[in-house]
Amino acid sequence: MPDNPNAEIIAIGTELLLGEITDTNSVFLARQLRDIGVNVFFMTTVGDNLGRIKGAISDALDRAEIVITTGGLGPTVDDMTRQAVAEALGRPLQFHQSLYDEIAERFRGFGSKMTENNRQQAYLPAGAILIENPVGTAPSFIVESDRGVVISVPGVPREMKYLITESAIPYLLRKYELGVILARILRTAGIGESSLDDQIGSDILSETNPSVGLAAHHGSVDIRVTAKADSKANATRLLDQMQTRLEARIGEHIFGVDDAVLEDVVWRHIEERGLRVHVTEAGLPGVVSGSWAAGSELLTTTTFNQPHHAIAYFEVDEAGDTLRDFAVEIAERVRASRGVDASLVVLSYPNLEENPDVEQGSAVAIATAGDQRFRAYGFGARSPLAREWLSRWALANLWKMLREPAED
């Protein structure tokens, strides 16, 4: 099978660079191209400037056989994609009366009057292949040249998705001998990116098919495995083989695949084994307990407004202890007094963000019959990091601790 073509995606619109809207189009396009075996090595965002759009298209054609642009096909003066594509490919724009008539008819169907500026939408680069747009008014097109193929579609997500799936992807499948690229995500918990990288090993991480990459998130790390083959069955076989190799090295850290959610995995484990868990939360209510359905006899909770309320309630001696020490002592006291299989404690100062003068603004502790784990953070409950980081660490370590007795 010949090497698959490369593609580059260009998102056009000053509003993207100003942060006024989020570019979801490029993500959608990348996934569509991946699934038909087209490599995407570059994504570019460029504002509404003719020279810069032209330059971005020309640069992309130096790197890729396929260039897909989104945006800039409307009727206003800042819609410059047609002109930029024509100039990048050294072609004039040509007026298409039949296209103009179709646009006018569409406006009549909408019950709207077409203004004169819509006339520019009937101009296409010479030799362009028209892509009919039944879901909007902006015509799209494909231009084939000795430098590569340029596909231009509107920036409106609904129109873009329809034209890509119904026209552009079928065109690419006909034009190129394409294989299949499949991806699988192995989701891990309770281990940092550098440690995971070390345990997987450079021999696996340096392989190209399947390729293995790491993506760190707040408190968790994903392993993305990508395989390329001449058929979906063969790509799946490559993914299965690599997953088996990874599980042999770091299987204890993998809690699921693709759409697996850590909260659901942990709760399912609790239910399947009939374990009893108590969660104590102070300053950040629901940070862990809110992940699970209330009312189960397996889960009990105690909530406080402030960490010191919890400390006073459990009569913990405050002399010289840190917030982490308090969390550890409360976790052990609750486990012993209530006879639960696991006691999880989260203490977080509710009015604290992140302060360099505060060493411990939040703390987590977990106690089981045979183990204790704990962690402190410099931020409090007002930090945007608090809920995700604290819940990820707590759930990841609870998942590992609850599994250990069953594996002994």
Image (spheres, rainbow, N blue to C red):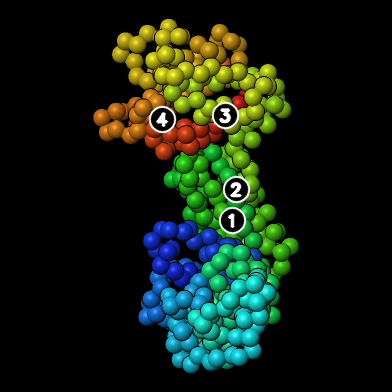
Label 3 – label 1 distance at C-alpha: 32 Å
Q: Residue at x 65, y 28 (%)?
A: 293
State the image coordinates of residue 298 (x, y, percent, origin top left): 66, 20
Left or right: 375 as drawn, with respect to 68: left
Mark closer to the chain start, 2 or 1: 2
- Which quadrant of the figure has residue 228? bottom right
Q: Which mark is residue 290?
A: 3
Contact, mark 2 vs mark 1 (Cβ under 8 Å): yes
- Quarter of the image where the C terminus is located: top right
Q: State the residue position of label 4.
A: 381
Q: Earlier in the sequence, mark 3 or mark 1?
A: 1
Tag 2: amino acid? Leu
Q: Residues within 10 Å of mark 1 (few under 14, many from 20)?
A: many
Q: Amino acid at mark 4?
A: Ala
Give the mark, 4 or 1, whose residue is nearer the N terminus.
1
- 38 vs 45, left or right, is right
User: Which residue is the site of mark 1?
Assistant: 225
Say whether residue 20 is visible. Answer: yes
* CA distance for labels 3 and 2: 25 Å
Mark 2 vs mark 4: in front: 4
Q: How many marks?
A: 4
Element on which disc 3 rests: helix
Q: Which residue is mark 2?
A: 186
Q: Which mark is residue 337?
A: none
The residues tagged by marks 3 and 4 sit, at their Cα atoms, a distance apart of: 15 Å
Check the image and report above or below for 309 versus 180: above
